[in-house]
Image (cartoon, rainbow, N blue to C red):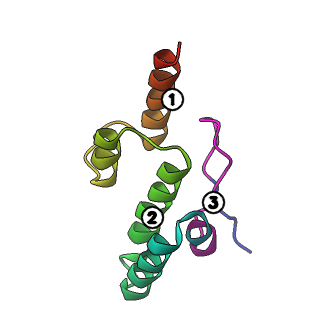
Amino acid sequence: MSAQTVHPHDAGLPPLPRTQNAVAGALPPADRMEFYREMGEADETELVGVLRRWWLRARLYAEPLPDETRAVVEAGQAPGRSAIALVREARAAREMGSR
């Protein structure tokens, strides 16, 4: 028996299990095909990284970030800051901008 990894949803987003089917279901159709292609081409050492990257992308679709922030996160160049922290900051910035 194995436990299904679920990201904590303290950013207000519903949880998204880190499984192939959950990630694929959260992606737009065009990206879903690319996700399945990358998963199919990944060897055993790459599978977790591919799944993690696409899981993050699926979360970004659910809670869009500013283009510049999204690009940095997708490129893996947001050192020392979790994706969930970036989502919180983007949400706070949007809320401040709408007041």
Q: Could you say where residue 42 lies in the image, as x and y percent from the top left?
A: 37, 83
Question: What main secondary structure does the magenta stretch of the protein show?
Answer: loop
Residue 73: x percent and y percent? Answer: 33, 47
- Figure quadrant of the N terminus: bottom right
Mark 3, mark 2: which one is toward the viewer? 2
Which labelled disc corresponds to residue 5? 3
Q: Give the vertical position of 49 relative to 46 (above or below).
A: above
Question: Which image quarter: residue 68?
Answer: top left
N-terminal of the pair, mark 3 or mark 1, is 3
Report which residue position mark 1 lands on: 91
Residue at image location 35% in from the left, 45% down from the top: 70
In the image, farthest residue toward the front: 98
Q: Which residue is mark 2?
A: 54
Q: Residues within 10 Å of mark 3 (few under 14, many from 20)?
A: few
The mark closer to the camera, 2 or 1, is 1
Query: What residue type is disc 2 on?
Result: Trp
Q: Residue furthest top?
A: 99
- Helix, strand or loop for disc 3: loop
Say which residue appears at 32% left-offset and 39% top-offset: 69
| CA–CA distance in space, label 3 to label 2 | 15 Å
What is the magenta range?
Answer: 7-23
